Amino acid sequence: MRENKETEHFRDPKKNGNALETLADDLERSSAGVSEYHDRAVTPAQTLAAIRPHLREFGITRVGLLTALDVLNIPVAFATRPNSHTLSVFQGKGIDNDAAMTSAAMEAIETRIAEIPPADLTQATVESIRAEHAAMIDLDNVARCAPDEIGTDLIPWCSGLDILSGSSVFVPWWLVGLDHRGERPPGFEQSSDGLASGNTPSEAVLHGLCELVERDAWALTQLKSPQRLKESRIDPAAFGDAVIDIMTDRITRAGMRLLLLDMTTDIGVPAFLAVIMPGNLSDRVDARWAHVCGGCGCHPDPVRAALRAITEAAQSRLTAIAGSRDDFSPRIYQRLDRSEAMQQVVELCEGDGRMRVFQARHPRAATIQETIGQIAGRLAASGIEQIVVVPFAHRVLPVSVVRVIVPGLEVDISGQYIQLGMRAVNTMRGAQS
């Protein structure tokens, strides 16, 4: 009964019917970010003030800072939700404390929203949807889906908006919602990839879209040869950005090294991998993966992408230091003796050769909606045929939550129901040639 009451409190069937219209309308508007470092209509502090009265309703018991547990002094925060159906501890990062706290709280909120199935789900088989010639997401190209494993049973479906065609499509709820309790649905690999929030639907779409392009870039980076990785090293100073310089200086003063790799793919949206590691790691006899912490970032603005990667790497360090992440393996704290992977990272950091300067390929868009259009255009030019957004309707929350799914993009190749796509295959062929 308790779960039913919570579901009734957060879900509104009438709002579910209007959520797609609200999303489509917002994507047609023109709204700029509050600063050159934030794709937000208001400041992070204002967002945090707006959602703070609702934290208890979503089961969030605490939001705080982890920054002082590390020597880097890069803002990292956490939010706890003990009764979560997935993780109970969430992390957030940013260029200041307000941004980090808001990031952690929003991640906890969006996960809670995704745990609650809408009241108006359609029960149908994949074949019955196809037989009706109803528009549906391209399951054959969704990375976290193995269509042959779904079977012939009824599964729940919801509606999403394909922002490339402007039409509504059916999407299996198991690609949208999150619930790690019990057995996983056959044929679907649940993940938080593309689950995002913002002050407006467009803000949420932009964050989810950037995350999926980032995941694709990271998946392809793991398939590249050591030589190609070495050639992708970027000099952080070459961006000429004051905030990046401050972050780099803090890392150096703490006795650490920063490795920044260009992961940008043929899509052309800047994506970077940042790795923070002790400066003396090659001389240490107690090396552990917890000492080597990475983070990825993606955004049409290369400075924004690099900052996301650097702050994500700092967040990874503090997550390992705090040790409270539910899904952490003890392996990251174990000593590594003669690890080839560790040695490769050390060689990338200490290797000779000049680091190159990143050259932006496209001018910066003026509004959030134009930025979405810019990314969508690059995806379409790369052969992507669908960009599906599923909005979550709710009664009380003053922010928007969406799930973005892009068939054809790759994800980290781990899991029971992961499909390897042609982008990954072509990258592996390139690594072998």
Image: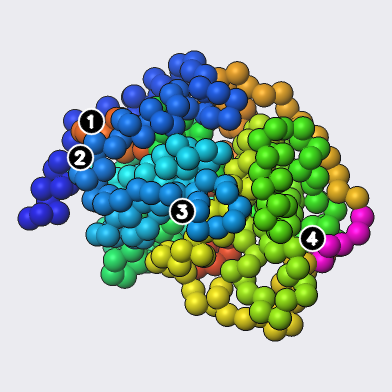
The residue labelled by disc 3 is 66
357 displayed left or right of 315: right
User: Alpha-carbon distance for marks 1 and 2?
Assistant: 8 Å
Magenta-drawn segment: 347-353
User: Which badge, 3 or 4, comes first in the chain's sequence?
Assistant: 3
* Sequence-earlier tag: 1 or 3: 1
Disc 1 target residue = 15
Residue 396: x, y in percent?
A: 22, 33
Q: What type is the residue that disc 3 sits on?
A: Leu
Q: CA distance from mark 3 to mark 2?
A: 33 Å
Asked which secondary structure carries label 2, the reply is loop
Asked if labels 2 and 1 touch by Cβ distance under 8 angstroms, the answer is yes
Q: Are marks 3 and 2 in contact (CB under 8 Å)?
A: no
Q: Is residue 366 left or right of residue 174?
A: right
Q: Which residue is mark 4?
A: 349
Q: Observer-nearest residue: 409 or 255?
A: 255
**Amino acid at circle 1:** Lys
The residue to which callout 2 is attached is 11
Q: Residue at x 37, y 58 (%)?
A: 89
Q: CA distance from mark 2 to mark 4?
A: 49 Å
